[in-house]
Image (spheres, grey):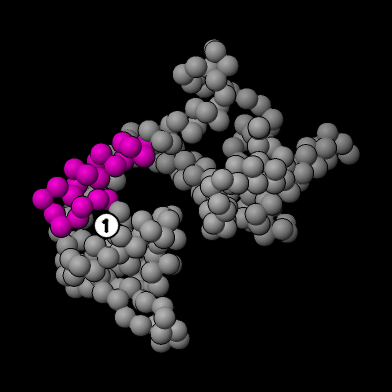
Amino acid sequence: MNYSVVKDVIRLLEEFDEENKMNSYPSDVEGFKAWLSGKEPLALNNQTDEPYWAGKESGRSPESAISTSLVHLNRYAKSYSKSAIIDSEFATQEDFIYLINLKTFGAMTKMELIKKNVHEKSVGMLIINRLINLGLVEQSDSDTDKRTKIIKITNSGIRSLENQMRKIRTATNIVAGDLSYSEKMQLIRILDKLEKFHQPIFNRNIDAKNLIDIISKEYSFIKN
C-alpha cells in the first residue's frame, strides 16, 4: 500500500473538518467529495504557483491583497451599475437588485429580502420604503403572522426592471471582464466558498465591537 496517499487523504480530511465548522457541506462522504471538487488541482498536490501582488516583496500578506481586490471590484461594479440606471427610476444598484430578487424568488418578508441582499435592517428598510413609494413593490400582511409584512414586485416594478435590463446585463458582462468560461467557473466556486463561510457569520448579527475577536477565536486558521 502507498502510505503517502493515505497520509494525503488524512491531511485532506483534517483540512475539510477544519474548514467545514459552519457546516457549509454535509459532514459525510458526499460532503467531503463536494468540498474536494471545489479545490484546485494544485492545492490537492500541495504545490504552489504564487502570483505577484502589490506589496508582496515588502511582506504584504495574500489576505490583504484579496481583501483590497474585493473592495476595489465592488467599487468598479458600482460604477457600471450607476451608469446602467441613469435616467431611470432607480436611485442605486440596490434598488434593481431588490427587484430582481423579488422577480426571481417571488414574494417574501421584508427581513428575508434584506438578508438575501446582505444588508443591515436600517439600510434595507430605507430601500424597501423607497421602492414602495415609487410603486415598484407592494406590501401586505402575512397569512400566518399579521405583524409580518410580505413584499412583492408590482407590474410597474416589472416594467421598470425590464426597461433597464439590457443595460444591467451589459454592466454585468463588463464586470466579468475578459475572463474565459473556465476562469468564470473557477471564480464562481471560489466566491461561493467565501459566501458559505461569511453568510452564517453575518446571520448571527454579532455586535461589531466583538465581531473580529469572536470569529478569530473560533477559527484557528485566521491570523491575529
- For the C terminus, the quadrant is top right
| Rendered residue at 69%/37% (across/down) | 221
Q: Is residue 193 left or right of residue 74?
A: right
Q: Residues within 10 Å of mark 1 (few under 14, many from 20)?
A: some
Left or right? Give the position of 32 relative to 191: right
Which image quadrant is residue 1 in? Answer: top right
Say above or below: 172 vs 100.
above
Q: Residue at x 41, y 36 (%)?
A: 71
The furthest residue to the bottom: 143
Q: Nearer the viewer, residue 115 or 11?
A: 115
Report x, y in % for residue 24. Answer: 62, 55
Main secondary-structure element of the magenta-colored stretch: helix
What segment carries the magenta color? Answer: 73-93
From the top left corner, tell me how far across and down residue 73 is, in percent.
Answer: 37, 36
- Residue 130, quarter of the rendered image: bottom left
Residue 172 falls within the magenta-colored stretch: no
In this rendered view, identify the residue nearer to me: 104 or 224.
Answer: 224
Would you place residue 76 above or below residue 113 in this image? above
Residue 92 among magenta residues: yes
Whether residue 26 is visible here, answered yes or no, is yes
Q: Residue at x 24, y 64 (%)?
A: 131
Q: Is residue 21 left or right of residue 167?
A: right
Q: Position of residue 99 (x, y in %)?
A: 28, 63
Which of these two is toward me, 24 or 153? 153
Residue 166 located left or right of residue 197? left
| Numbered disc 1: secondary structure | helix
Residue type for callout 1 = Asp
The residue wearing badge 1 is 95
One can see residue 193 in this view: no
